[in-house]
Amino acid sequence: MSYARHLRESYGLPVFDFPEAEDLKGLAALPEADAVAWRISSNPYDATESWPAAFARFTAAVDTTRVKSLVVGAWEEAYDRGPGDIVEALLAARDRLPALRALFLGDMESEECEISWINQGDVGPLLDGFPELEEFGVRGGSGLVIPPFTHGRLRSLTVQTGGMPAAAVRNVAASSLPALEHLDLWLGTDNYGGDCVLTDVEPIMAGDRLPALRHLALRNSDIQDEIAAAMAAAPVVARLAHLDLSMGVLTDQGGTALLGGQPLTHLTSLDLHHNYLSDPLKQRFRDTLAGAGVRLDLDRGHADEDEWDGRVWRFVAVGE
């Protein structure tokens, strides 16, 4: 089992934690407003300050007209309540954030809140309320709602979950995103609410609504074999530079189908790390693709198998 980690970069900028009130008093100077991605957090277990209060301090201390990236970190009782008041605070401040181009909601590590314990909500108002965004990401699938949306400038969309609701998957697939170049969906496992099936992601593989897509990640899935087999003939693959089917339950069944389908030699990279592939099949991938210049990641990582009651159990990289 792996865990989601704090973002280290957003919109090409290093992530900087906006200090707590006491730490801010003793700080000589803050970074320039447009030099970092600002992570604003509240203690999820013993908060002395709410997230909106921390954000209010931030808007008073920083020239928000120059802020390019905001990262919403932990909020109080994230394991029990969603980010409704955070969404309201961000929307209320949008006129003071004219340069904002990147927003990430729920950047928490397991010590703050396990990914499948993070309570999310409807992110549609943020996507509608910030039409100039170029990058948007969200972590946590519990209560997550992504309505179908149209966004003319969004270049990158990331949804990290231990279980992504099927409705959210379908609605991403139904959205109109003409500028989207990078799509990264952690589909997760049905043990944690990841109830999508292959037909839910097939419109993404067709690529009709994603004319600019160059990097596609459909990963961390317990239906990874089905996805890999469908990718063997998916129309979108021919125009991708980067294909990522990592972190899931990928076995020789899906790997063989993928390798036996349409050519992949045009790819810049193929990421299959955290897999259950046999060594002979991995060598076939190397023989077929590495010589063509495709950068491969075939590292098995922590993909351990357990046998119980006569059955072999395999797991996604990030579940709980």
Image: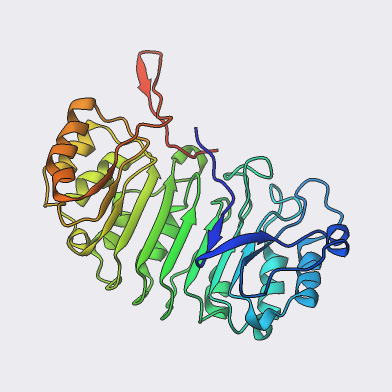
Q: Where, by quadrant of the figure, is residue 126 drawn?
A: bottom right
Taking the spot 37% from the left edge, 47% from the top edge, the residue there is: 219
Where does the image place residue 223, in percent across and percent down from the top left? 33, 41
Whether residue 145 can be seen here: no
Q: How many marks?
A: 0
Closer to us: 76 or 141: 76
Q: Is residue 103 left or right of residue 32?
A: left
Closer to us: 120 or 295: 295
Asked if 309 appears above or below 240 in the picture, the reply is: above
Q: Is residue 58 left or right of residue 65?
A: right
Where does the image place residue 115, in percent across and percent down from the top left? 58, 45
Taking the spot 37% from the left edge, 39% from the top edge, the residue there is: 248
Closer to us: 151 or 296: 296
Taking the spot 29% from the left edge, 72% from the top edge, the residue there is: 212
Query: Colour scheme in the image?
Result: rainbow
Residue sticking out furthest to the top = 309
Whether residue 154 can be seen here: yes
Where does the image place residue 119, in percent across and percent down from the top left? 63, 52
Closer to us: 23 or 159: 23
Identify the image quadrant of the C terminus.
Answer: top right
Where does the image place residue 296, in percent across and percent down from the top left? 27, 44
Asked if 56 appears above or below 318 in the picture, the reply is: below
Residue sticking out furthest to the front = 28
Asked if 137 appears above or below 178 in the picture, the reply is: above
